[in-house]
Image: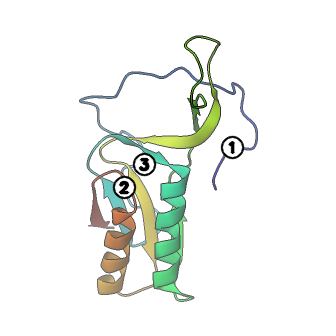
Amino acid sequence: MLAPRKVKHRKWHKVAGASGTKATRLTEVVFGDYGLKSTEAKWVTARQIEAARRVLVRYIRKGGQVWTRIFPDKPVTSKGSEVPMGKGKGAVDHYVFAVLPGHVLFEIFGIPESQAKEALIMAGHKLSVKTRVIKK
């Protein structure tokens, strides 16, 4: 799974959702020919990113290239089951990336348009965020 090697702060505060805001960076296809763009704001976990990446790699075989434009760096904590109230914050459970509407999540290059669109749609099904396929 994707996780940062070294972090300044092991546990982060849980911030309020970014309602009404749109992405100002990572909004255009830069490296590939086709991209997968989010249309809503949600957290995407490291497991979901890896599952989508595997779908794309399986589709392109050795004919193309895939770029993952997001990296899960936000730690999410959870307490064990049957732990009483209080007693501090739980341990880091997994990492997420906070996606905003307009973020380009994946880019693909080197395969025909029909295959690229099909691969990106299948990868989008693996994510918790609604997506659409865009062209450079």
Label 2, label 3: how many angstroms apart (C-alpha)? 6 Å
Residue 47 in picture, x, y percent from top left: 54, 55
Label 1, label 2: how many angstroms apart (C-alpha)? 25 Å
Residue 108 in the figure: left or right of residue 100: right
Q: Which tag is nearer the camera, tag 3 or tag 1?
A: 1
Circle 2 residues within 10 Å: few <14, some 14–19, many ≥20: some
Q: Residue at the spot x=46%, y=77% of the render?
A: 109
The foreground one among 107 and 8 is 8
Per the image, label 3 sits on a secondary structure element best described as loop
- Mark positioned earlier in the residue sequence (1 or 2): 1
Which numbered disc covers residue 28?
2
Q: Which residue is mark 1?
A: 4
Residue 80 in the figure: left or right of residue 53: right
Residue 28 in the figure: left or right of residue 81: left
Residue 106 in the figure: left or right of residue 46: left
Label 3, label 1: how many angstroms apart (C-alpha)? 19 Å
Residue 83 quadrant: top right
Disc 3 marks which amino acid?
A: Leu
Q: Which residue is mark 3?
A: 26
Q: Residue at the spot x=42%, y=56% of the render?
A: 105
Q: Are marks 3 and 1 in contact (CB under 8 Å)?
A: no
Circle 3 residues within 10 Å: few <14, some 14–19, many ≥20: some
Disc 2 marks which amino acid?
A: Glu
Q: Residue at the spot x=58%, y=24% of the render?
A: 12
The foreground one among 38 and 109 is 38
